[in-house]
Each structure stands twice: as C-alpha cells, then as structure tokens.
Image (tube, rainbow, N blue to C red):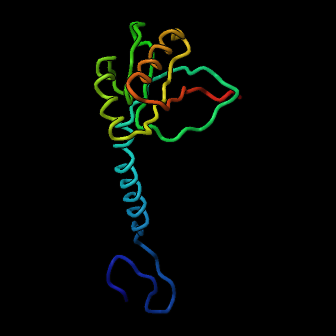
C-alpha cells in the first residue's frame, strides 16, 4: 500500500486514483506571461501617441527610422501644437535641439506629420524652419491610399 496523497498503482498491480494536480505547466505559462508583460510594458509607457489624422496619398515610399519626428496637431482647446518625438514643444526648443543633432548626424532625417486640418502655411513654416537649421532630408508623413 502506498502512503501519501498520490498513488499511481496499488499493491495489487492495478491503477489507483491520481489525487494530485500537476501545476507545473500552469506556473511555467504564468511566468512566461509575466516576463512578456515586464518587457513590453515600459515600451508601451514610453511611446506616447499623438492622434493625428494624416492626409491620404496614393504614392509614397518607406523612410528610414528617423532620429527626429515633428508633429503638428490641434490640442484639446483647438490651438496649434508642435510635438518633438512625442513631447509637446515649441519653436524655440526646436531651434535649440536641431543644431546639436545635426552636428552629431549629418544625415539627420526629420519626419513631419501634420493633421489634415492644419493649414498648408503652417506645414511650410515648419519645413522651412527645419531646413534653415541644417536638416536637408525630411519626409512628410501620410496614410497610404487604399
């Protein structure tokens, strides 16, 4: 006779009752999910998104990963807002930031994303600002036309 909570066979050679539940696979899956969430959570938290309704374009090319992303959008009060790499900014900060980035990277590319409700003049002003600060490669972000 087997003493303990689990018996896989009895003294008569027959199969007894399995009284234990193997929780090892459950623990393994739980730990894997925990590790996945621990790795992904900081990336989600550090990647704020700005809701911009981009204009549609039938043509366009993929661009390289940019070091600098400028976004023009209207904030909750309807005021034109400028964002640099996802953080709210203004032209003075852009004027201070870009020259130091150009010194470190001569091939700096800037991606400019503007909501479709932003006036054309405001977009051209940002393009002119970026070019005057030494960035010669820039792209205008659009949604691909279906």
- Which residue is drawn at the image coordinates 41% and 10% (left, top)? 80
Q: Is residue 39 above or below residue 81?
A: below
Pinpoint residue 55: horizontal percent, then vertical percent: 60, 20
Which picture quadrant has residue 105? top left
Q: Nearer the viewer, residue 14 or 114?
A: 114
- Which residue is drawn at the image coordinates 34% and 43% (left, top)? 42
Pinpoint residue 40: horizontal percent, then vertical percent: 39, 47
Pinpoint residue 5: horizontal percent, then vertical percent: 35, 76
Q: Is residue 38 above or below residue 131?
A: below
- Which residue is drawn at the image coordinates 61% and 27% (left, top)? 143
Q: Is residue 39 above or below residue 124?
A: below
Q: How many marks?
A: 0
- Which residue is drawn at the image coordinates 38% and 30% (left, top)? 85
Q: Nearer the viewer, residue 57 or 95?
A: 95
Q: Nearer the viewer, residue 6 or 51?
A: 51
Pinpoint residue 10: horizontal percent, then vertical percent: 44, 87
Q: Is residue 104 above or below residue 112?
A: below
Point out the image quarter for the C terminus: top right
Which picture quadrant has residue 86? top left
Point out the image quarter for the N terminus: bottom left
């Amino acid at each position: 006779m087997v003493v303990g909570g689990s018996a896989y066979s009895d003294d008569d050679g027959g199969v007894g009752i399995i009284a234990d539940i193997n929780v090892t696979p459950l623990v393994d899956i739980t730990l894997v999910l925990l590790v996945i969430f621990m790795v992904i959570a900081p990336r989600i938290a550090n990647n704020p998104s700005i809701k911009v309704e981009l204009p549609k374009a039938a043509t366009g090319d993929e661009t390289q990963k940019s070091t600098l992303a400028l976004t023009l959008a209207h904030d909750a009060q309807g005021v034109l807002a400028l964002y640099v790499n996802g953080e709210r900014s203004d032209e003075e900060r852009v004027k201070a930031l870009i020259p130091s980035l150009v010194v470190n990277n001569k091939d700096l590319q800037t991606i400019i994303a503007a909501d479709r409700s932003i006036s054309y003049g405001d977009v051209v002003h940002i393009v002119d600002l970026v070019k005057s600060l030494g960035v010669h490669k820039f792209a205008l972000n659009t949604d691909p036309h279906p």
